[in-house]
Image (tube, rainbow, N blue to C red):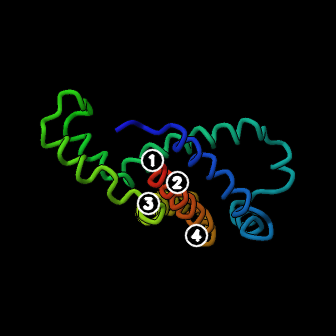
Amino acid sequence: MEINFLALFTAAISTLIVGFIWYNPKVFGTIWMKESGMTEEKMKGANMVLIFGMSLFYAFLMSFIIQSVTIHQFGALSMIGGNVENAKPSYTSFMADYGTAFRTFKHGMLHGFITGLFLALPIIGTNALFERRSWKYTLVSGGYWIVSFMLMGGIICAWQ
């Protein structure tokens, strides 16, 4: 099983697209700005190329984890140490039977949702507690990552 870098990169780009919509002032942008203490003046002084570039890089790193969560066959690959050439016949037989099982957009979205809800949201919530941010901030930021992980999971899982 090969890593599909194009799917991972596309999934990473999807986080920027979701962000453009999610953080639009007509959606959750105004709430996020108020709850995070962000102002128009602070935003104007930012290096947006660096911010978007690093955001894309971080999303690409996250896509590797989303891949292993959404594509169950990576579990079988990890059991043999990642070296298909030295695998026992049982691995080949398993992959022949289940090599494309559960490789749908819907299934990837389900696992993306679970990952967002049980991983991203608690991380953001914990940080928000220590940073003394509101529950609105936690829900807006956590919701963004839940939706982003769902889309990432769908793209990565379905793209074979």
N-terminal of the pair, mark 2 or mark 4, is 4
**Disc 2 packing (10 Å; few <14; some 14–19; many ≥20):** many
Q: Position of residue 132 (x, y in %)?
A: 58, 63
Three-letter amino acid code at the position of disc 1: Gln
On the rendered structure, is 54 left or right of 47?
A: left
Dot 1 lies on which element? Answer: loop
Residue, x 22% and y 27% (percent of image)? Answer: 85
Dot 3 lies on which element? Answer: loop
N-terminal of the pair, mark 3 or mark 2, is 3
Q: Tell me the quarter of the picture where residue 45 sits.
A: top right
On the rendered structure, is 98 left or right of 15?
A: left
Dot 4 lies on which element? Answer: helix
Residue, x 69% and y 63% (percent of image)? Answer: 22
Residue picked out by circle 3: 104
Measured in 3D between alpha carbons, the distance from the residue under mark 3 to the one under mark 4, in whole angstroms, is 28 Å
Residue, x 31% and y 45% (percent of image)? Answer: 74
Q: Position of residue 146 (x, y in %)?
A: 53, 63
Three-letter amino acid code at the position of disc 2: Ile
**Disc 4 packing (10 Å; few <14; some 14–19; many ≥20):** some
**Disc 3 packing (10 Å; few <14; some 14–19; many ≥20):** some
Q: Quadrant of the N terminus?
A: top left
Residue picked out by circle 2: 155
Three-letter amino acid code at the position of disc 3: Thr
Dot 2 lies on which element? Answer: helix
Measured in 3D between alpha carbons, the distance from the residue under mark 2 to the one under mark 4, in whole angstroms, is 24 Å
Residue picked out by circle 4: 139
Q: Tell me the quarter of the picture where residue 26 sits.
A: bottom right
Q: Are marks 2 and 1 in contact (CB under 8 Å)?
A: no
N-terminal of the pair, mark 2 or mark 1, is 2
